[in-house]
Image (cartoon, rainbow, N blue to C red):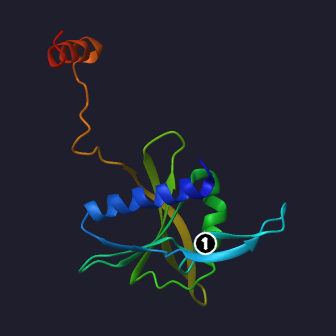
């Protein structure tokens, strides 16, 4: 699977989690771009995505702060933090989050940008830092059922469903 495909899948997974929590979620809209193939020299069409203020998703819920979410993998944490920090954020009114997919697992580590105001000798020293909040797992679909009987129970179940 290509990195673009993985990114799209991870964004879709985060969107599903947030919508399950009652949020309205909007993401980037892909646009058509033409690029020149470096091997053949021919023009080819690609669908290019474009982040919105350095994030992939925006989540809204009545009575809650707007959530600006960047989705990536844990190995890209540092680069994604820098990408998001370029923009001015008002953390009293909005939440800036990194959702980082764990390799080989169906879960995300969530980091939130927070401000830590501390009084200094001449005034306030405004510092911003990333804090790990929670780990979110993908919920099982309604059709996906866990086999609690072990392999023996599965064999019995299959035998009862498929009579010879």
Residue at 40% in and 56% down? 13
Name the residue nearer the viewer: 148 or 87. 148
Left or right: residue 108 versus residue 121 is left
At horizontal 61% and vertical 90% (from top left) the residue drawn is 122
CA neighbours of label 1 inside 10 A, class few (<14), some (14 to 19), many (20+)? few
Quadrant of res 63 = bottom left
Residue at the spot 52% in from the left edge and 78% down from the top edge: 118
Q: Which quarter of the rendering shows the C terminus?
A: top left
The foreground one among 45 and 83 is 45
- Horizontally, residue 159 falls left or right of residue 88, namely left
Q: Secondary structure under badge 1? A: strand
Residue beneath disc 1: 48
Q: How far across and how far down the image is residue 138, in percent? A: 35, 48
The residue at 63%/72% (across/down) is 83
Q: Is residue 77 above or below residue 29?
A: above
Count of picture labels: 1
Find residue 93 and report its image quarter.
Answer: bottom left
Q: Position of residue 81 (x, y in %)?
A: 61, 67
When asked about the image quadrant of residue 39, the answer is: bottom right
Q: Viewed as shown, does residue 87 lie left or right of 25?
A: right
15 or 34: nearer the viewer: 34
Name the spot of residue 116 as percent of width and height, x first.
Answer: 50, 74
């Amino acid at each position: 699977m290509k990195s673009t495909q993985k990114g799209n899948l991870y964004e879709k997974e985060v969107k599903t989690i947030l919508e399950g929590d009652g949020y309205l979620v909007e993401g980037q809209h892909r646009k058509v771009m033409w690029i020149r193939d470096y091997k053949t020299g021919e023009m080819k069409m690609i669908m290019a995505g474009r982040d919105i203020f350095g994030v992939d998703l925006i989540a809204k819920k009545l009575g809650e702060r707007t959530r600006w979410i960047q989705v990536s993998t844990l190995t890209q944490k540092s680069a994604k933090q820098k990408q998001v920090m370029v923009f001015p954020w008002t953390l009293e009114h909005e939440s800036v989050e990194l959702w980082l997919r764990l390799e080989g697992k169906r879960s995300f580590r969530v980091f939130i940008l927070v401000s830590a105001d501390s009084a200094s000798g001449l005034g306030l020293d405004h510092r911003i830092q990333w804090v790990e909040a929670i780990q979110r797992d993908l919920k099982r679909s309604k059709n996906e059922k866990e086999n609690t009987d072990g392999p023996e129970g599965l064999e019995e179940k299959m035998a009862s469903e498929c009579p010879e």
